[in-house]
Amino acid sequence: MIDTSKVLISRDELSKMVDDVASKINEAYNGEELIVVGILTGAFVFISDLVRKLDMPVTIDFMQVSSYEGENSTGVLKVKKDLSTDITGKNVLIVEDIIDTGYTLQCLKNMLGKNNPKSLKICAAFDKPDRRVNDLKPDFKGLVIPDEFVVGYGLDYNGMYRNLPDVCVVKFVED
C-alpha cells in the first residue's frame, strides 16, 4: 500500500513557483517567440500552468522519450513521440517535470541541438541535484527537492497519482 499523506510542496507553493519561473522566462526571452517542448508524461501539469503565464508568442509541442528500463539507464535515448514542429532557428525551451540523474535530458538536449535552434534551454519544475550523474543544470528551475520519491503535480508512481494537487512523499506501507 502507498501512503501519500506527507505533503512536501503545497499547491500554494506550486503556484508561487510557477509564477517565479514564468517571470524569469519572460525576462529572458523579452517577447521573442518561443517553442515550448513538453516532455511527456509528467510535465503536462507544469506546462499547462506555465504557458498561461508567458508573455510572448508560444508554440507548444510534446515529446516522449526514455533512456531507462525500470530503474536502470540503457545508455540509449528512445524517442516514443517526436516533435511535429521544426525548431530550426527558433528559441526552444525543453520543459520537464523533474531532473533526476540528468542523463535523459542531456541526451535530448544533444539530439535537439543538431536541429540548429536559435537557442535551446531547459526548464524543470523540480530538481534533484543529489542524484545527478552529469553536470547538467537547468536554465530555469522551480524548486530543489530532496532525494525522496514524490508524486503529484504530474509526478507519478506506475502512472498513478499525477492528479494530486500537491507534491507528496511516497511511503510504502505493508498491509
Image (spheres, grey):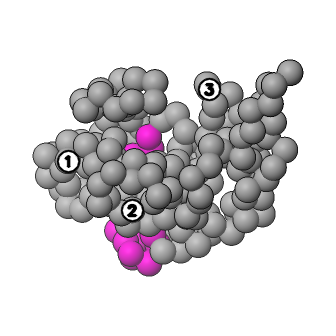
Residue 19 appears in the rendering:
yes
Name the residue tied to disc 3.
159
Name the one closer to the observer, 53 or 12. Answer: 12
- Marking on residue 121: none
Mark 2, Cα crowd under 10 Å, few <14 / some 14-19 / many 20+, is: many
Q: Which residue is mark 1?
A: 110
Q: Residue at x 58, y 64 (%)?
A: 143
The answer to which image quadrant residue 137 occupies is bottom left
Residue drawn at (67%, 41%), measured in percent from left and top?
151
Quarter of the picture containing the C terminus is: top right
Q: Secondary structure at mark 2?
A: loop
Q: Along the polypeptide, which appears first: circle 3 or circle 2?
A: 2
Distance, label 3 to label 1, CA atoms, is 27 Å
- Magenta-highlighted residues: 25-39
> Secondary structure under badge 1?
helix
Give coordinates of residue 64: x percent, y percent. Answer: 40, 31
Using a 10 Å C-alpha cutoff, classify the residue at mark 1 as few (fewer than 14 neighbours), some (14 to 19) or many (20 or more): few
Is any atom of residue 52 visible in this view?
Answer: no
Name the kind of residue labelled 2 in the image. Answer: Pro
Q: Give the residue type that dot 1 points to.
A: Asn
Q: What is the residue that sits farthest to the front in this orientation?
A: 174
Is residue 32 on the magenta stretch? yes
